[in-house]
Image (spheres, coloured by chain):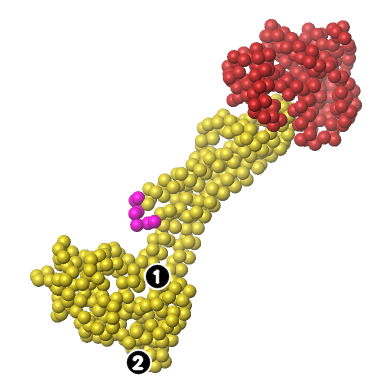
Chain colours: A yellow, B red
Amino acid sequence: MKLADTIQFASGSLRGSPTRTLLMMLAMSIGVAAVVVLTALGEGARRYVIDQFSSLGTNLVIVLPGRTETAGVGPGLMSGQTPRDITLDDAEALLRSRAIKRIAPLTVGSATISRGALNREVVVAGSSSDMLGIRHMSIAVGSFLPPGDLHDSASVCVLGNAIKRELFGNGQAVGQSVRIGDRRFRVIGVLASQGESMGMRTDDLVIIPVATAHQLFNTTSLFRVLIEAKNRDAIATAVSEAEKIMVQRHSGERDVTVITQDAVLQTFDRILTALTMAVGGIAAISLAVAGVLIMNVMLIAVAQRIKEIGLLKALGAPGKQIRHLFFAEAVLLSGVGSVAGLVLGYVGSFIIGKVYPMLPVSPPWWAVLAATLTALGTGVLFSVWPARRAAKLDPVAALAGK
Amino acid sequence: MIELQNVCRTFTVGDQQVAALRDIDLRLDAGEYISIMGPSGSGKSTMLNMLGLLDRPTTGTYLLDGGKVSDLNDEQQARVRREKVGFVFQSFHLVPRLTAAQNVELPMILAGIPAEERKARVQVLMKNYGLTDRADHKPDQLSGGQRQRVAIARATVMNPTVLLADEPTGNLDRNTGWEVLRLLEGLLEQGITLVVVTHDAEIGARAHRCIHMLDGRILSDESLQNDPK
């Protein structure tokens, strides 16, 4: 018997009992759709978190003052010392490392910004020109802080988008002056609206040169130093060299903490991937249930078509061919069922994506592949027994309907 | 062509052994027209199934063209049924979801014959049996006589050497029954071996050789005068 004829005959017998066929396909497709939608959600959550981290900057290493111990009391407390501050010179010294591409010092404080009668409290960040590139920010109008000596305390500022709108409305801001604290600043640029990234709204931020910020807040210490490593492979070197340089400059004391965004990112990535797989696995159980259903219905089909099987044997079909016919039915059922399930799953994912626009919902390819293969696999696996049973029927008894 | 030597067939019903065939010795030659008669339960249907390789002897030997059938595996036996044997049943046994033409086509599908050739052969047969305008009808839209004609077309589409008919007229009225019988007898001209199981004495008497069975044994095996040879 030719393959095409086998498939045609099998699909003919499936069409012969349309309700049963439809119900079985429905069970199969719900299973596949469940896997697709749930893994799409998990993958969406994973990508959301990763995107959030990536928007902080790539190959990012952060130096913060103070040593974070996992247990016990910090050495600073034991000796009665507070950790030493990180200074601008410390930050500049970091550039000696070949693994470090660029740095941006960061000082944060709050101050009142005013223009004429309008004033409000804002977060003021003191930084340098490299901040723009490291933090993946972009400028809407004008320019960012000018490059040059970090110790230059120019009275210029870059406004977040929301601040600009509150102070200037739709009018021109660049070139105008504002008052921050007790100093007058010239506005040289406005940040493009970026929305929220990891809880920090750049829209409500005012950025001024780091030396100016030190004067404004009357301090010499830095809140953070943001470091961009040369590339992904250089991150580990950048961390150890940054630590080494800081220890050197702080007379042999390890009083800074160096963290990488990568480490945090990988942890989240692992957790969320595991979660996605777990959820997908749970959904796959419904596929196994669909498989059992297929077996059940196949057994009924063997009983109902017992005379037909007897006839096929009388007409010269060997047991192998009968088995193939039932196999073909199972494969067709689960094949069409899983295609319908994929369509259903993708439509479902699309709708979820519309409802939660911030989630980048898209089913991962491995889940789609696994769902389809599991569907086909269970379909075939659970048809083995019914098919064998049909093939082994005694033709005389089968023809008599016994 | 076919030879049964000392063939027995016993069934186990509950914890009892029931012998359907006992010590059967029979020889069938090509082109013979044989009727098998006997009361129900005499083993005539079992005999027919045995001849058609649907059933296997419990003991004894079945020789087909000199070779032992018990030496053939399932696939080879199926091949023999496909290529050498045609069955016609009392209750037609047409596949209800297939049309008349598709039912006739079925053995050729199983044999793996290409679609164009199948179509051509079906067309010829449907025309020969006067079923052309019924080709696309499902079995439940056909009369009994038409159904049996479709069944005969299906049984002969592979040009078998033996045609085994189990009460082919049993479910038909008298006139249609005769029609069907004449159709079967017409196949003799093509050299087919025709075996008809019946308990209608009038039909049984038309054969060239009549075998009477009782309790699984051959009671009598007589040549009749109908043989044209």
- Relative to B60, say whether A251 is above or below: below
x then y, percent, for residue A341:
48, 44
State the separation of the CA atoms marked 1 and 2: 37 Å
Q: Which residue is mark 2?
A: A80
Q: Which residues are magenta?
A: A354-360
Q: Which residue occupies the extreme left position in the image?
A: A117
Q: Quadrant of residue A47?
A: bottom left
Residue A72 in view (yes/no): no
For the residue labelled by badge 2, is the local secondary structure a helix, a strand or a loop? loop
Looking at the image, residue A64 sits to the left or right of residue A21; the answer is: left
Q: Chain of mark 1?
A: A
Circle 1 crowding by C-alpha within 10 Å: few under 14, some 14–19, many from 20: some
Mark 1 and mark 2 on one chain: yes
Chief secondary structure of the magenta portion: loop
Q: Residue at x 48, y 61 (%)?
A: A273
Looking at the image, residue B205 sits to the left or right of residue A118; the answer is: right
Circle 2 crowding by C-alpha within 10 Å: few under 14, some 14–19, many from 20: few
Q: Quadrant of residue A185?
A: bottom left
Point out the image quarter for the N terminus of chain B: top right
Foreground tag (1 vs 2): 1
For the residue labelled by badge 1, is the local secondary structure a helix, a strand or a loop? loop
Earlier sequence position, callout 1 versus callout 2: 1
Q: Amino acid at mark 2?
A: Gly
Q: Residue at x 17, y 67 (%)?
A: A173
Q: Which residue is mark 1?
A: A58
Camera-side residue: B126 or A48?
B126
